[in-house]
Amino acid sequence: MEIDKWCRSLAKIICFLFFCIFAVSIIIPIGWMILSSLKTNREFLTDPWGLPEVWQWENYVLAFRQGVGKFFFNSVLVTTVSVLLIVIISAMASYALSRFEFKWKGAIFIFIIGGMMISPEVNLVSLFKLMKITHLYNTHIGLIIVYCVFDLAFTVLLMRSYMLSLPKEIEESAFIDGCSIAQVFAKIVLPMCRPVLASAALLATMNCWNEYMFAAIFIESKELRTLPVGLASLQKALSTKYPILIAGLTMSAVVVIIVFLIFQKQFIRGLSQGSVKG
């Protein structure tokens, strides 16, 4: 008994140390990025790990004026619309796949999650031609459609698994009381699915916000570029002004960090409960 107790204590200590090291490996680069964005160019080059003598908050203003503000707005627009569509469509599809019996149900589900096995890079040429034919090239609408298509597979898999774990008795009682399918879905199922909805929305937000490849290929106009592509294009203009460029990178990273901190409890709960049933 004492040996088992000692082994459990040792395992806890090892896990604690591992997660401490993991947390430090994440916090240090973020802290360095924030500090670097508040330095002068001379301080950044001569003392990259030191504190700035004077906090250069105007670096963020200069980055905003260099075009980061426009890119930031484009990313917010594309990400918000994409995430809303992904969550709404996935929730409706998952509800149908988890609650109703119909012909080809299993085949449809396999077809949807089969999208997870397709590499986005494989579809670049065909998607580019399709965008040109449908006049969606160099538009935010085309980019939003692409983001939705490639994120739906995992989101449906996650939401369907979560909905399978929900008790059906509440929904059956609502049907007996005269509620329609739409009312049950909107007023009963969706409120019970808040954790997995938050998890799906957070994952989709990170994917859409940080996506570079599709945004670089399908968006040609500088006015429509999203933040990752816009920051890459600013490297030439700000090649010797590193703190201003890092300020733009910080603005990009802070959004995802804030969103994650707000929804972290729902995110963990949604992922853990969404893996109960398959």
Image (cartoon, rainbow, N blue to C red):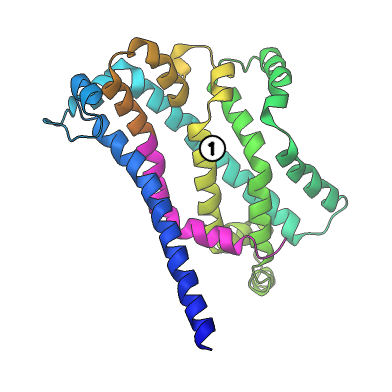
Classify the position of the C terminus by image quarter.
bottom right
What percent of the width, then of the height, locates residue 71? 40, 22
| Residue lying furthest front | 3
Q: Residue furthest left?
A: 54
| In-front residue for pair 261/15 | 15
Element assignment for label 1:
helix
Given residues 165 and 249, the one toward you in this image is 249
Residue holding disc 1: 207
Q: At 28% across and 36% down in the image, what residue appears?
A: 34
Residue at 35%, 46% (x, y): give it.
Answer: 27
Q: Is residue 202 left or right of residue 72?
A: right
Image coordinates of residue 63 in percent, x first then y, are: 29, 21
Which residue of the protein is positioned furthest toward the bottom in this rendering? 1
In the image, residue 233 above or below residue 165:
above
Crowding at dot 1, Cα within 10 Å, few <14 / some 14-19 / many 20+, comes out as some
The part of the image, by quadrant, that contains residue 50 is top left
Q: Measuring from the top left, give residue 28's x and y in whole percent.
A: 33, 43
| Magenta stretch, overall SS | helix
Numbered range of the magenta stretch: 253-278
Identify whether 170 is placed above or below 148: below
